[in-house]
Image: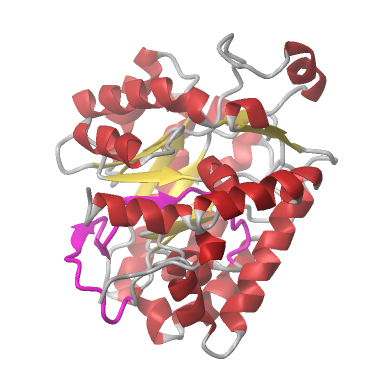
Amino acid sequence: MPVTTSDSSRPGAYAALFRHVLARLDPEQAHRLTVRALATAHALPGGPAALRAAFGTPDPERDPRPTVRVLGAEHRSPLGLAAGFDKDGEVPLALLDLGFGHVEVGTVTAKPQPGNPRPRSFRLVEDRALINRMGFNNHGAQALAHRLATARRTERGQRAVIGVNIGKSKVTALEDAAADYRFSARLLAPYASYLAINVSSPNTPGLRDLQGAEMLRPLLEAVLEEARASRRRLARDVPVLVKIAPDLHDEDVQAVAELATDVGLAGVIATNTTIARPPSLRTDRARIEGIGAGGLSGPVLAERSLEVLRLLREVLPQDAAVISCGGVTTAADVRARREAGADLVQGYTAMIYEGPAWPGRLARELGPLG
């Protein structure tokens, strides 16, 4: 039986909603409304099935598409949702019902924190891009562990591919970062399909300094130790990856790849947002300068993200996974990343501009793992 989508899920309908309603709201307010709407819809009797019907997503119980095993989990689509959308793990199963093959929740920190002062999220509509300086606003690792434990108690939740992205608490000194990451990893590894170590956000002071090999090694080793301890309790592996910035020099990308291989990471996620403001941006420069600091995401990131992916594939062993993220909008973008060596691909900003039908539409265009 062919999958159909409702009129409300079609790109034209969402474009009108975005132009006339969402674009008039503060981006963070629009985001909160979206999360609440997903949570409400998913909690209703028959809500998950209704979401899948509305956005043309096959029922996971009846999906005929074959799966491919990546990072120890079965994936029906190569496209996942990057960290940042569902920081506190409020709606991972609802997001999977939109058509993502996996969802990465977080970034979460050991200690709850409010993040940076508002406003801290800005749309560059002409570039279909975002600038954010959220600052890891989240309710903390303990709260996320509780939510994921609840989700994992359901049959659907047990099968769901949910990665967990962990970062450093702002109040934690850089020299104590390993212990901070270790605390989050210990709490969250039992519920994570994989752990992602975020050392590349531009919005926590000093965080990117942790990408240097000397400071990065003890972090990676601390999280790996907790993941391995969880493996003994869970009787399954908890893969660990590190997420890097697009602003690293090529030799630093290669150094991170060599370190990841040396300590035994499962792979690398590339890339996070950029602090650059390329001249190709069409948004008025005065407005960009007025926005100020923050990480830039969107199509402008695509070229560098693809370059970093290729660099990683030159250094990493064949069995190491690479999740490519940054500037992904179309099925052709996903195919290009896969052809360049990505095992999985992630997006986020495109969904803001394309709407909730976007992941399901790309999954149908791509087929199983593109």
Between residue 269 and residue 241, name the one nearer to us: 269
Where residue 45 sits: x, y (%)?
56, 91
Count every numbered label the image shows and give the total: 0
Q: In the rendered view, would you say 254 is above or below 94?
A: above
Q: Quadrant of the N terminus?
A: bottom left
Residue 8 position by quadrant: bottom right
In the rendered image, residue 84 lying in the magenta stretch gets the answer: yes
Where residue 323 sits: x, y (%)?
34, 42
Please identify the dominant SS of the magenta region: loop
User: Residue at position x 79%, y 40% from top?
Assistant: 116
Q: In the rendered view, would you say 144 is above or below 329?
A: below
Where residue 129 sits: x, y (%)?
60, 31
In the rendered image, residue 63 lying in the magenta stretch gets the answer: yes
The segment highlighted magenta reads 60-89
Residue 35 visible to an observer of this rendering: yes
User: Residue at position x 19%, y 64% from top?
Assistant: 67
Between residue 1 and residue 121, name the one nearer to us: 1
Q: In the picture provided, is 81 more to the left or to the right than 111? A: left
Residue 180 visible to an observer of this rendering: no
Residue 189 position by quadrant: bottom left
User: Residue at position x 66%, y 31% from top?
Assistant: 125
Q: In the rendered view, would you say 143 is above or below 117?
A: below
User: Residue at position x 53%, y 46% from top?
Assistant: 354
